[in-house]
Amino acid sequence: MVSDYGCWDRGEMIWDPRLRRDLRDWEIAEVINLLGHLSSLRLVAGHVDALVWKVDHSRGFSVRSFFKELTAKGDCSFPWIAIWKSKAPLKVNFFVWLVAWDAVLTTHKFQRRDFMLANRCYV
C-alpha cells in the first residue's frame, strides 16, 4: 500500500519508493517528476489506504479500462500498430520494437556496462 513507500515525519509523508533496480539515465527525470507530484499530495496520518480506480468506479481497475483511458487522450506517439500489425516475421517486428524503445544492445551500450569488446572486426 501507499504507506509502505514512505514514513511520517512531523505530520508530513517522506517518500521512499525503494525501486527494484537501478534507474536508466532517461528514467531519472521521470522519477524526479513523480516524486514532485507525490510531494504535492496531502495525506492524513491514520487513514487506511484503499485502492481506487477513478476511471471506472463501477467495476474498478481493468486492463481494458486502462487501455481505453490511455488511447482516448490521443497523445500516444509510439508506433505500435505499424510494428505489430505489419506482415513482417515476428522476429523482425520484435527487433523493430526494441529499436523504437532504444533497447538494442549496441557496442557503445556494452562498453558503458564495462564489457570488454574488440573495437574492430577481424573477419
Image (cartoon, grey):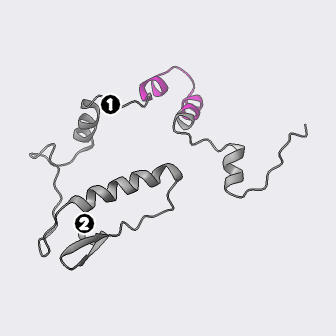
Q: Residues within 10 Å of mark 1 (few under 14, many from 20)?
A: few
**The disc labelled 1 sits on which kind of residue?**
Asp
88 is within the stretch colored magenta:
yes
Nearer to us: label 1 or label 2? 1
Q: CA distance from mark 1 to mark 2?
A: 28 Å
The location of residue 110, given as percent across then percent down, is: 69, 51
Drawn side of residue 75 relative to residue 95, left or right: left
* 47 is higher (above) or lower (below) than 41: below
Label 2: few (<14), some (14–19) or many (≥20) C-alpha neighbours in 10 Å = few
- In terms of image quadrants, where is residue 11? bottom left
At horizontal 57% and vertical 26% (from top left) the residue drawn is: 89
Mark 2 — residue? 2
Q: Main secondary structure of the magenta part?
A: helix
Question: Foreground residue, 9 or 114?
Answer: 9
Residue 49 drawn at (x, y percent): 16, 67
Q: Which mark is residue 75?
A: 1
Taking the image as drawn, is residue 53 in sight?
Answer: yes
Q: From which residue to which does the magenta span run? A: 80-96
Q: Please state if 3 lies on the left or on the right of 45 as rendered.
A: right
Q: What residue appears at the point 22 percent right and 39 percent down from the top-left corner?
A: 65
Answer with the quarter of the image where residue 70 lies.
top left
Look at 59% across and 32% down and name the residue there. Answer: 91
Q: Is residue 63 above or below residue 51?
A: above
Q: Is residue 16 magenta?
A: no
As displayed, is residue 77 above or below residue 50? above
Image coordinates for residue 85, horizontal then vertical, percent: 45, 23
The amino acid beneath tag 2 is Val
The one of 59 and 109 positioned closer to us in this rendering: 109
- Foreground pick, 37 / 74: 37
Callout 1 secondary element: loop
Residue 116 in the image, given as x and y percentages of width and height? 78, 56
